[in-house]
Image (cartoon, rainbow, N blue to C red):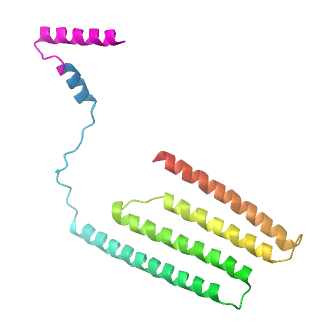
Amino acid sequence: MAEAVEKQEQEERESAERDGRRPGDERAERTRENQEEIPEPDAPEAEVPAPVAFLGKVQDLVYYGIALILLVLGVVALARIVADFVDQNEPFAGRITEGVNGVLFVVIVLELLRTVLAHFHDSTFHLKPFLIIGIISVVRHILTVGAELSLQNDEGGDLFHRSDIELAVNALVVVALVVALVLVRQTE
């Protein structure tokens, strides 16, 4: 193998000498041809018309407002969850169920906040956060239905059969969302 490489290099040197070129010029030329054209970093950007720039600033202000509202909503919801959990009027199992449900709601709000904040970095639409929010929402619903079902004593009743169907459909939705998330991650 090494002999073949040496032979090829020798042939290139001889060919270059005959043509009046320096050895290795041909290889450098081929490498330059195969490289992608890279724009200069100091190239001036296209000028944005004033009305479009103004609308962009207004849009950013709206996004800042939405981010602030989501942050306040998350903090208020978390405070309410803690207050409801400490409340002794409800049975402990009910408080745990509501606490998990509320914490998952706060996680959903924070994922929405993260999505809004990601807009400021690259101004593009991201599908992954919405798939993650969907998965968390469906899992939250599954946990809530399962917990409510376990707290009730309606074995074999109509409520039990409806809950089983609802849980099965929600499980299928989670599988579909996870498959979609995997596909989106593979295409990135």
Q: Is residue 149 magenta?
A: no
Whether residue 101 sits left or right of residue 1 in the image: it is right
Picture quarter containing residue 166? bottom right
What type of secondary structure mainly makes up the magenta span?
A: helix
The magenta-colored residue range is: 1-25
Whether residue 87 sits left or right of residue 11 in the image: it is right
Residue sticking out furthest to the bottom: 89
Whether residue 134 sits left or right of residue 13 in the image: it is right
**Can you give x and y, in whole percent of width and height, for residue 150 in the image?**
79, 73
Residue at 69 percent across and 57 percent down: it is: 172
Compared with residue 164, is residue 83 higher up or lower down, i.e. above or below?
A: below
Residue at 45 percent across and 71 percent down: it is: 113
Viewer-proximal residue among 37 and 68: 68
**Can you give x and y, in whole percent of width and height, for residue 110 in the image?**
49, 71
**Can you give x and y, in whole percent of width and height, for residue 72 in the image?**
46, 82
Viewer-proximal residue among 180 and 90: 90
Image quarter where the N terminus lies is: top left
